Image (tube, helix red, strand yellow):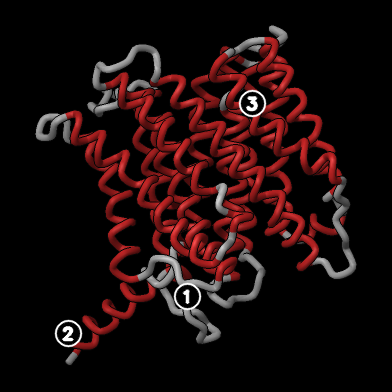
Amino acid sequence: MGLENSAQRASVKRRVLFALGFRPFFLMAGFFAVVLVGTWLPTFLGSPDFETYYGLIGWHSHEMIFGYASAVIAGFLLTAVRNWTNIQTAQGLPLATMAALWLAGRVVPFLTDGLSRWLIALVDLSFLPALATAVAIPLVGSGQKRNLFFVPLLGLLTLANLLVHLELNGLAEHTARRGIFLGLNLVLLVIVIMGGRVIPFFTERALPGVMMRRWPAIEWLSVASVLAFPVAEFFFPNSILAGTVAALAAASNGIRLAGWYTRRFWSVPLLWVLHLGYAWIIAGFCLKAFAAASLVGLQYTIHAFSVGGIGVLTLGMMARVSLGHTGRPLKVANSITFAFAIINIAAVARGIFPIALPGMLPNLVALSGGLWIVSFLIFLWVYTPILTSPRVDGQPG
């Protein structure tokens, strides 16, 4: 009887886990965030290298974008598209298959002795087209033309990933680095587009009486400049043109963020973490502009985007969306507030301090990596039961 009850509970958890896209993908993103940095950090600090299809640095860079960030984007889009269209997105076996495909892409780079390099590339390249198909079907079926642009965006992310694999398989030269940076910039574009929608919405909803200020020209320019930046950096990397576009992106998005400001959000961790995450993107564009003017080194322009913009904002977004879509109160535990704080410290330690303290880089990387790991371990501790349990209000999802 006990074994039967245990099997029934396990079956219920599986059904719940694959009821809506945010559940498996946010859970896997949280685990992978720990694995990604926890595996790479000891090697960076002097432990023996490990073998992967991408190489050590290539694996770390590729998996931050096409592993971690892609999982968060998948969870968000599969959930948001259902809301936008009132059409159920992938669930059950189709969702489990997509999750397995993403997971396979994370595992096969370590199987270089047993698998051909082309098979490894094919497995990794399959996930984003599958995601694009899964979101395109309900968007087309509902006539949601406004949101169809996510489909070609996922196509461009696939192209960026393909550029990495082409060089690794000897079909092109000097494309892997361009593919990594194109992928990073496209992820930032997705964040800027979605942040412009949800951050003001979440803020106004949580703080009655607060109205976000929006200026049509700034709304247009904040997205257009971030859209133009990948083009400028891809064709004219580290140029004055790319730096000028970065400065425009920083200025327009800075004005946009200022229009969302209210002192009241500092009392709500689920809000200030999103605003700070968006501010990190602005900081990253500032550093890109400074690098084009030779005011900072190029090596210092990446981690304000990756640890700050992507890490901080996605952690906050996963925390907020998971509560909202499981019918729970939009209030986080003190431990999650602590996680929000320390991932911002991790971003400062990795994205800002090395500019002034280059001689302390190993210590700063260790500090940042340790804080990153702790913040996502806290997320997993608090949110694994939430993501694997039914909605508390009895609604589907």
From the top left corner, tell me how far across and down residue 233 is, in percent. Answer: 59, 19
Which structural element holds mark 2?
helix
Query: Residue shown at 72%/9% (left/top)?
Result: 293
Q: Earlier in the sequence, mark 2 or mark 3?
A: 2
Q: Earlier in the sequence, mark 1 or mark 3?
A: 3
Q: Nearer the viewer, residue 202 or 41?
A: 202
Tell which residue pokes out farthest to the bottom in this image: 1
- Left or right, residue 234 beside residue 256: left
Q: Which mark is residue 3?
A: 2
Q: Name the residue tied to disc 1.
A: 397
Judge whether residue 41 can be spotted in this image.
no
From the top left corner, tell me how far across and down residue 387 is, in percent. Answer: 45, 68
Q: Earlier in the sequence, mark 2 or mark 1?
A: 2
Q: Name the residue tied to disc 3.
A: 229
Q: Amino acid at mark 3?
A: Phe
Query: Residue shown at 61%/44% (left/top)?
Result: 191
Q: Is residue 261 above or below residue 322?
A: above
Q: How far is mark 2 from mark 1, CA to CA? A: 27 Å
Q: How far is mark 2 from mark 3, CA to CA? A: 57 Å
